[in-house]
Amino acid sequence: MLRGAILGLSVGSWLCGQAGDSKPAFEVASIKPSPPPGPRGMMVGRFGGPGSDDPGRVTFRNFDLSGLVVVAYHIDYYQLSAPSWLQDERFDVVAKLPDGATKEQFQLMLQNLLAERFHLAAHREKKEGPVYELVVGKNGPKLQESPAEPIPKSELESAPTRWHSKLGGDGFPLLPPGRRPWEEMIGSRASWRYADTSMEEFAAMLSTQLRRPVINATGLKGKYDFTLRYVLERANAGDDSGPTLLGAIQGQLGLKLEPKKGLIDIVVVDHIDKAPTEN
């Protein structure tokens, strides 16, 4: 099996709601249609849950059904095969988790909630498709190994929550000082800072951004601090003053993305209702 082609997928549950003899469930869960957007649009977000400051409660605001399925199965959108209308209606979901629930248990709870309230039926399958292999370029990597010490807590806490974005002399957004991971986008230009990042983690981040599996084949085992500056692909045709993401990876990091074919795990939605049963 091609290592890395399966991105974050749990192999334990092949049918929605199937988890051995048990069906983990939220203690209480509410699903309501989201209100119409206001004059300023709408905020889409997920708050709380395992690993957050509020592990016993999770809230989804303005999530469409495709987004809920993606979270439930811990996949990226390109790994979801479902009717396009799943993006038409949005819902607010609030659920209370049992004490000590893990991320894996939370995902099963959400799968089971969708099966119960929307009659979701889904299965996993593999299909051949385009993937990338992340490899070291011919001149070697241009990466700085992360210091042994983690980023100081004082730096994380003192980092600005509101950074006044502006372009630097190189034409790309400036980043606040320090090592704290940060991303800035102004128009078509992006600056991303990574810290304490392994190549496995970097490949996973690229998979989400490129909407294609990225397999770490660099052989690099450490953790690294680095920054990427690039012009967004969708705008690059009219902007020749900066590299694309793929060009920046090669020129700034000494790495390369090579197109390949590989097996991709996907989740196929066999059935789902457009509206939930009542709370």
Image (cartoon, rainbow, N blue to C red):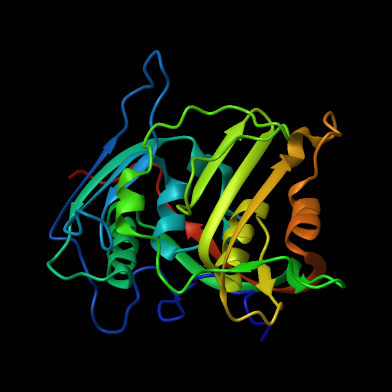
Name the residue at 12% across, 67% down.
99
Picture quadrant of residue 69: bottom left
Q: Position of residue 259 (x, y in %)?
A: 82, 66
User: Residue 82: in sight, yes or no?
Assistant: no
In the picture, measured across the screen, residue 201 lies left or right of residue 118, that is right
- The picture places residue 263, in percent across and down from the top left corner, at 69, 75
- Quadrant containing the N terminus is bottom right
Question: Which quadrant does the C terminus fall into?
Answer: top left
Residue at the top extreme of this rendering: 39
Relative to residue 105, is residue 228 depicted above or below? above
Horizontal side, residue 54 vs residue 209: left or right: left
Locate residue 241: give its quadrant.
top right
Give whichever of 190, 263 is nearer the camera.
Answer: 190
**Residue 40: percent from the left, percent from the top?**
41, 17
Residue drawn at (35%, 51%) of the image:
156
Relative depth, front residue between 252 and 77: 252
Left or right: 259 as drawn, with respect to 79: right
Q: What residue is shown at x 40% (from left), y 48% (from top)?
A: 273
Above or below — where is 173 with respect to 127? above
In this figure, what is the number of numbered marks?
A: 0
Residue 152 visible to an observer of this rendering:
yes
| Of the pair 68 and 2, the residue shown nearer to us | 2
Work out whether residue 143 or residue 258 is closer to the camera in this orientation and state it. 143
